[in-house]
Image: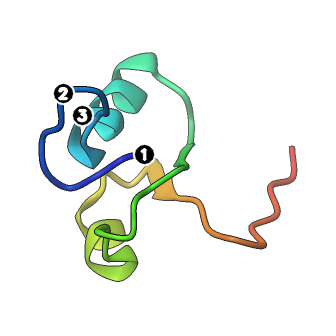
Amino acid sequence: GLRPNPHPSHMTVDEAAQTAVEMGAQISFLTHMTYMVDHETTENALPDNVRLAYDGLRVSW
């Protein structure tokens, strides 16, 4: 899953956030984070249109 530090087979949270920004979506939700990701600290560091998903999140279109 997404993690704070580089790993040979997984993106970091920063890499995933940058990819989301490059895709140009109005809002993106990152999923499948490892236990190493502190939700509050990470959420506060993300671009405005990128958020961390969480259990029970409901998204309406």
Q: Position of residue 38 (x, y in %)?
A: 31, 76
Residue type for callout 1: Gly
The residue drawn where x is 45% and y is 48% is: 49
Rendered-image quadrant of the C terminus: top right
Residue that badge 2 annotates: 8
Residue type for callout 2: Pro
Local SS, label 2: loop
Reply above or below: 41 against 58.
Answer: below
Rendered-image quadrant of the N terminus: top left
3 or 1: mark nearer the eye = 1
Labelled disc at residue 15: 3
Local SS, label 1: loop
Find the distance from the CA under tag 2 to the CA under tag 1: 12 Å
Residue that extends furthest to the front in the rendered view of this protein: 8
Q: Position of residue 10 (x, y in %)?
A: 31, 33
Foreground residue among 43 and 34: 34
Q: Is residue 49 left or right of residue 13?
A: right
Q: Residues within 10 Å of mark 3 (few under 14, many from 20)?
A: some
Residue that badge 1 annotates: 1
Find the distance from the CA under tag 3 to the CA under tag 1: 12 Å
Reply above or below: 23 against 11.
Answer: above
